[in-house]
Amino acid sequence: MAAPVMKSEAELARKMLRVETESKSDRALQYALLDNARKLFAAAGDAELALAAVDSLAGQFELDPWQLKTETASWSRLTEAIGLVLRDPAAGDQS
C-alpha cells in the first residue's frame, strides 16, 4: 500500500474519532465511527491507534475486546505484509 494512501486512511480515521466525540446522542453512529476508525488505522499500519479505538469501543459498548484486538492485530500484520510485497515483490515469492 502506498504511503500517501496509508496517510489519508489515518487522517480519515482521526476525523471519524473527532466526529464520534461530538455524536454522543447517536449510539449507532458512535459505534460505526469507532469501528471504522479502528479498521482504517489498522489498514494504515497504526496498530497503536487501532487498538486504542478497540479500547474506546469496549468502554462504551458490550463486546469482547480481545476478539476485536485479535482481529485488528491480524489486519495490521496483513497490511504490513502487503506493504513489504508492494515494496519488494520478491518478498512475497514463496517458491
Image (tube, rainbow, N blue to C red):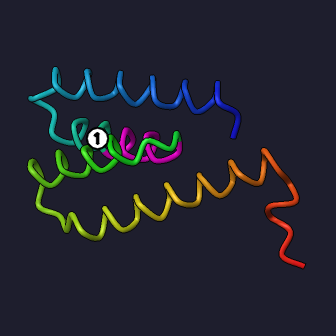
The magenta span reads 35-43
Q: Position of residue 26 (x, y in %)?
A: 15, 33
Q: Secondary structure at mark 1?
A: helix
Point 45% across, 25% down: residue: 12
In this orientation, which residue lies closer to the viewer: 20 or 52? 52
Q: Is residue 84 above or below residue 67?
A: above
Q: Is residue 36 above or below residue 64?
A: above
Q: Position of residue 76 (x, y in %)?
A: 49, 54
In this orientation, which residue lies closer to the viewer: 74 or 29? 74
Relative horizontal placement of residue 95, taking residue 61 as reference (left or right): right
Q: Amino acid at mark 1?
A: Leu
In the rendered structure, does residue 47 fall within the stretch colored magenta? Answer: no
Relative horizontal placement of residue 76, taking residue 69 as reference (left or right): right
Quadrant of the image containing the C terminus: bottom right
Q: Is residue 7 above or below residue 91?
A: above
Residue lying furthest bottom: 95
> Mark 1 sits on what residue?
34
Relative horizontal placement of residue 44, taking residue 23 as reference (left or right): right
Q: Position of residue 52 (x, y in %)?
A: 24, 45
Q: Is residue 55 above or below residue 91?
A: above
